[in-house]
Amino acid sequence: MMKRIAAGFACWLCCLAVLTAQESAPVYYYSPVPVAADSLSTPELFRTFAEHASGGGAVTVVQDSKVERLLDAYRQRYDEATIPGYRIRIFSAAGNTARRQALDAMKTFSESYPDIVPYLSYDEPYFKIYVGDFRIKSDALRFQKQIAPDYPHAFISADNIRVRADRENLILQP
């Protein structure tokens, strides 16, 4: 229900942008790709609609505060969503210094691969580091091969991953 409301609101805003834009201004079309939680931040969403090219029209959005609360509630719910997927375990250790070693391994990995999220897990007595949020196994396998020189004992593990969709829900058409 929340997804339909947010999608309908975005469509309405797109139609408004198309109707008020001049011919030389860029036109924004709604793409039905699922929206990432952080791309739904209210200021960013409305700033996108207010942008215009020189000599073009501008869209002024007047909104009720309930709309902002609705989008924030949707974003919070979407942030917590998980789906079945895959991660790669790059580290596992037990003992008195295992926690410190795991944190060091996380730091080293983050410096080498800043775009991939590492996760620390404690499954008594082991500290484990998993990396990535891969929806399909072939993507996980491709990344495992990429990191194999640094992490030769890494392996793929099925896990519930965070939902991540394309950040772009609006496509700029010339």
Image (cartoon, rainbow, N blue to C red):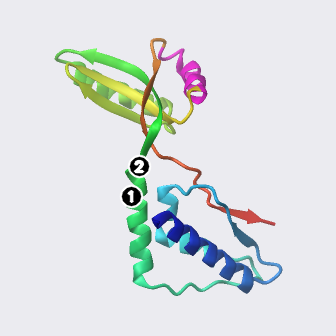
Left or right, residue 55 beside residue 126? right
Q: Who's the residue at 47% across and 66% down the image?
A: 1
**Image location (x, y in percent) of residue 87:** 46, 29
Q: Who's the residue at 38% across and 58% down the image?
A: 77
Q: Who's the residue at 66% across and 82% down the image?
A: 16
Left or right, residue 105 beside residue 5? left
**Image location (x, y in percent) of residue 98:** 24, 19
Task: Inspect the image, locate mark 1, and give the three-letter code of the amino acid beneath it.
Answer: Arg
Q: Quadrant of the image for the C terminus?
A: bottom right
Label 1 residue SS: helix
**Image location (x, y in percent) of residue 15:** 68, 78
Residue at the farthest front position: 1
| Residue 147 part of the magenta segment | yes
Q: Which residue is mark 2?
A: 81
Q: Which residue is mark 1?
A: 77
Q: Are marks 1 and 2 in contact (CB under 8 Å)?
A: yes
Task: Inspect the image, locate mark 2, and give the three-letter code of the amino acid beneath it.
Answer: Ala
**Which portion, as a residue range, is magenta?**
138-151
In this view, 164 is above or below 76: above
